[in-house]
Amino acid sequence: MSGLREDEAAPVRSGPAGLIPAQPGRGEGESMSTADTGDTGRTGPGGGVPGGDGSAADGSAAPVVAGAGPVARPGERATVRLRDADPQEPPRYAPEWLQLREGADAAARAPELLDPLRIRLANLPGRAGGLVVHDLGCGTGSMGRWLAPRLDGAQHWILHDRDPYLLHFAAVASPRVAADGSCVTVETRRGDIARLTPDALAGASLVTASALLDVLTREEVEALADACAGAGCPALLTLSVAGRVELTPQDPLDAEITEAFNAHQRRAGLLGPDAVTVAREAFAERGATVQVHASPWRLAPAQAALTEQWLRGWVGAAVEQRPELRDRAERYLRDRLAACAAGTLRVTVHHTDLLALPRPTNGAA
Ligand SMILES: C[S@@+](CC[C@H](N)C(=O)[O-])C[C@H]1O[C@@H](n2cnc3c(N)ncnc32)[C@H](O)[C@@H]1O
C-alpha cells in the first residue's frame, strides 16, 4: 500500500531574519511543485506571516474572505488564483486569511485536551528519540506554532499539505523550541490527505490537524482514523466547525444564513458541521478513547478585521448556496459590517477540538 505522496517535499528558503516574504520569490511557487525528496527545513522561530493587506496572493485587489477562505472575484469560490488555474483544481487558501485567523485560533484551542495528550506522549515507547508529529493540512503552520512550544522534548514536525505555496510559509515560520527548550525541526511533504495510509504515518508519535476535518469527506475521515489506528498514534484534531454561530445583537436573518452556510459546507459530500460526530465515531470504532472539547472563536471589537472577513465569507457562502437570499443578505451584510466597524458586534463561532487516544500498546499508559 502506498503512503501519502511524499514525492514533492518543498525546499525551504528562509527569508531575512525568519520573515516570510509576502509571496514566494520569482519562480519559487513553481519550483516547490517539482519533485525533490527529503528536504528538511529548519527555520527561525515565529517569523512573520504574509502581508495581510487584504490583497490576493496574485497581487490583484481581490479581498481575502473568511469562513471558507478567500474569494477572488464575485461568484468565484474560495480560492486564490496564483496563476490561471485548472477549474478542476481544489480551492486554495490564502495565507493572509490563515494569518488573520491565527490569533483567534490560538485563543480558541482547548487546552483541556493537552494534559491527557502530554501524559500519553510521556509514556510512549521510544519517546527518548524525540516526538515525530505529522500536521495534516498544515496551511501556513499555525498548529505547530501553537503546539510545539507546549510539548516537552525534541520534536520533528512533518508538515503535510497539497498546496506548495502554503508549505513554503509553514516551513519558513516553523517553531524551533519545545516547552523545555529542546530542539524542534520541520520538514514539508506535499500530498493529498485523501490518500493517507498507515504507511505514511509509520513511526508517528502524534497526528495533528487544525481546521481540516470539516473540509474532508466521510471516507477521508475514515481513512485518517484507519491510518492513525494502524500507526497506533494519538490524533489531536482541532477547530472543526460546529455549525453554530451566535451574533449579538441578533438579526431575524441569522438563522437562515446559518442554515444556508451549513448546507454549503456539506456540499459535494464534505462533512462540514458533521465532521466531529463522524470522526468521533470513526476513531471510537477503531478502539480509540475520544475526548471532545469546545473551542469557539469569541470575536469582539479587537478582532474586527477577522470578524469582517469572516462575515463576508460566511454570508457569501450562504448566498452561493441559496441565491434567493441575495437581496436580504446584502442588507444583512451591510448592517453587520457597519456594526463591526462601530464596535457593537460580538460573534461567537463555535468549533470543536477532538483528541483520540488509541488503545495503549507496549506498555504505553
Ligand atoms: C482551513 S485550512 C487550515 C490550515 C491550517 N491547518 C490552519 O489551521 O491554519 C485547510 C488546509 O488543508 C489543506 N487541505 C485541504 N484538503 C486537503 C487534502 N485533501 N490534502 C492535503 N491538504 C489539504 C488546504 O490546502 C489548507 O492548507
Image: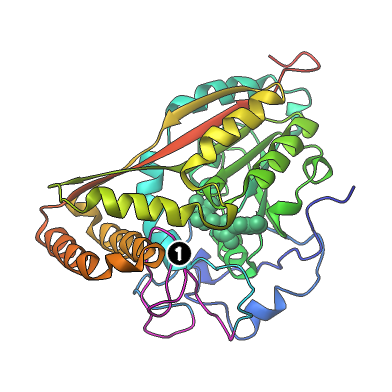
Residue drawn at x 60%, y 53% is 137
What coloring was used for the rendering?
rainbow
How far across and down, in percent of the image, does residue 243 sit?
39, 43
Q: Which residues are magenta?
A: 58-84
Quadrant assignment for ligand 1: bottom right
- Horizontally, residue 214 falls left or right of residue 244, namely right
Which amino acid type is marked by label 1?
Val
Residue 43 visible in the snapshot? no
Res 348 → quadrant: top left
Res 148 → quadrant: top right
Label 1 belongs to which residue? 49
Residue 207 visible in the snapshot? yes
Q: How many marks?
A: 1
- Above or below, 314 against 15 in this view is above
Quadrant including the C terminus: top right
Kind of element beneath mark 1: loop
- Above or below, 198 against 303 in this view is above
